[in-house]
Image: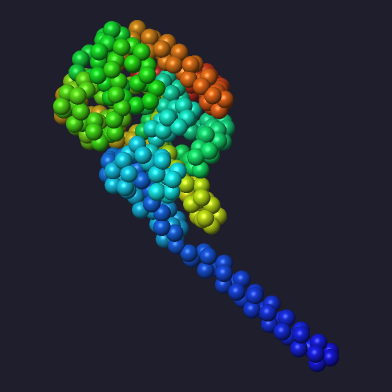
């Protein structure tokens, strides 16, 4: 090889070796890069189930990532008010949020179908629709225009019907009732004459204590016991018609998500899925235990809505859903997809869990 060619070869080889070494160093360096994200929530600090599991989600990410993804959790009001969490993520004030979709129905009425539909799917059915029935793609489509990616983060299971300071024996008893309730259940009760109000979870106990409201829906026995609602309303109705399987969410700013390595993106999805399973189990266990405390130690009367009341609630619920579904093209797509699977799941239920639950009462 001529000397000049040899020199050129060695120079090229040197550059190649240096480049290869740099590339070899770049990947581990990228893998070790740390990211710190801010997650706001709609929940009071350490609220059973919801607040606690937001913290657990963050801890799962820290462990899965080996400390590369550190999520600082802010309870409601610590960084932004609870009902401003969505806007905080959309604007970049926060990177993530843990909440529930129907808090943002002003953005799109389609979000009702991802939280709680009166007489709708149970938590397991809703998860099945999201994961395997096309629900997640529709959810992504709803949030895409806001620059947000949603992840399912679990459910509290079938919610209680709420706390009342008088018995509900006929639909006439809803008239004039000042009642705290979120979502479509509030619209149903409003059409039956109730004066429904929406307020953050952290204000419910005070409103009941002060007589600002005559009753309130929050979650179920576990949360209701922790919030002390039994001290201010005598009658506890179960189950609730309005949220058979309410969904929780983790939402992430899409620009923030795009800036993460692929493995950390995958870890967010894995952590959300693990949190979803844990959250439902957490609520299922603690609701059972807490109801016994409410009845045995605090003398709470647990009642069910009379059949004629339930029938009327169902009629009004169907009308509300029918009207809302026609609001826009995307809401109709979501409603039709949800409704199609609900019809199939309703036919299947008596042959599965519903049948077993009936047998267990024999």
Query: Which residue is nearer to you in this view: 71 or 195?
Result: 195
Q: Quadrant of residue 201?
A: top left
Scheme of image coloration: rainbow
Q: Nearer the viewer, residue 183 or 89?
A: 89
Q: Is residue 13 left or right of residue 141?
A: right
Instruction: Tell me: 289 left or right of 341.
Output: left
- Above or below for 212 versus 56: above
Q: Quick check: 48 above or below 2?
A: above
Q: Residue at x 25, y 36 (%)?
A: 202
Q: Quadrant of the N terminus?
A: bottom right
Residue 187 visible somewhere in the drawing:
yes
Q: Residue at x 38, y 25 (%)?
A: 183
Task: Give the camera-side residue of 240 and 99.
Answer: 99
Q: Percent from the top left, x then y, of residue 321?
A: 46, 18
Foreground of the two, 315 or 195: 195
Residue farthest toward the front in the current orientation of the protein: 91
**Identity of the residue drawn at 24% across and 19% down:** 178
Q: Is residue 120 found left or right of 310 in the rendered image?
A: right
Q: Is residue 56 visible?
A: no
Q: Quadrant of residue 138?
A: top right
Q: Residue at x 41, y 33 (%)?
A: 104
Spot occupied by residue 197 in the image (x, y as percentages of width and height): 29, 24
Q: Is residue 360 left or right of residue 48?
A: right
- Image location of residue 22, percent across then percent down: 60, 74
Where, quadrant-wise, is the C terminus in this rendering? Answer: top left
- Residue 102, given in percent of the width and then of the height, sits at 41, 30
**How many numbered circles does the render carry?**
0
Residue furthest to the right: 2
Vertical order, 117 against 72 (above or below): above
């Amino acid at each position: 090889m001529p000397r000049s060619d040899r020199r050129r070869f060695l120079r090229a080889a040197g550059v190649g070796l240096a480049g290869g070494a740099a590339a070899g160093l770049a990947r581990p360096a990228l893998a070790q890069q740390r990211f710190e994200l801010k997650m706001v929530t709609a929940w009071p600090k350490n609220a059973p189930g919801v607040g606690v599991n937001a913290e657990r989600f963050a801890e799962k990410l820290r462990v899965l990532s080996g400390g590369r993804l550190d999520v600082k959790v802010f309870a409601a009001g610590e960084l932004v008010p609870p009902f401003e969490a969505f806007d905080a993520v959309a604007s970049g004030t926060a990177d993530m949020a843990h909440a529930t979709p129907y808090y943002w129905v002003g953005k799109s009425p389609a979000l009702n179908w991802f939280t709680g539909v009166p007489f709708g799917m149970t938590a397991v059915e809703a998860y099945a629709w999201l994961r395997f029935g096309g629900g997640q793609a529709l959810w992504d489509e709803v949030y895409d225009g806001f620059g947000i990616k949603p992840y399912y983060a679990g459910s509290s299971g079938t919610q209680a019907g709420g706390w009342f300071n008088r018995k509900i024996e006929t639909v006439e008893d809803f008239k004039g009732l000042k009642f705290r309730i979120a979502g479509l259940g509030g619209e149903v009760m409003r059409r039956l004459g109730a004066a429904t109000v929406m307020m953050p979870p952290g204000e419910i106990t005070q409103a009941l204590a002060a007589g600002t409201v005559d009753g309130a829906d929050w979650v179920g026995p576990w949360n209701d016991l922790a919030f002390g609602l039994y001290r201010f309303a005598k009658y506890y109705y179960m189950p609730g018609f309005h949220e058979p399987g309410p969904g929780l969410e983790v939402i992430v700013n899409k620009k923030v998500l795009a800036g993460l390595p692929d493995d950390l993106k995958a870890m967010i999805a894995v952590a959300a899925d693990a949190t979803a399973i844990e959250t439902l189990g957490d609520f299922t266990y603690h609701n059972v235990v807490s109801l016994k405390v409410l009845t045995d130690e605090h003398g709470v009367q647990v009642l069910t809505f009379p059949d004629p009341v339930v029938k009327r609630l169902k009629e009004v619920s169907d009308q509300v859903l029918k009207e809302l579904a026609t609001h826009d093209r995307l809401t109709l797509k979501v409603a039709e997809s949800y409704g199609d699977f609900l019809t199939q799941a309703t036919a299947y239920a008596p042959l599965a869990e519903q049948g077993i639950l009936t047998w267990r009462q024999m």
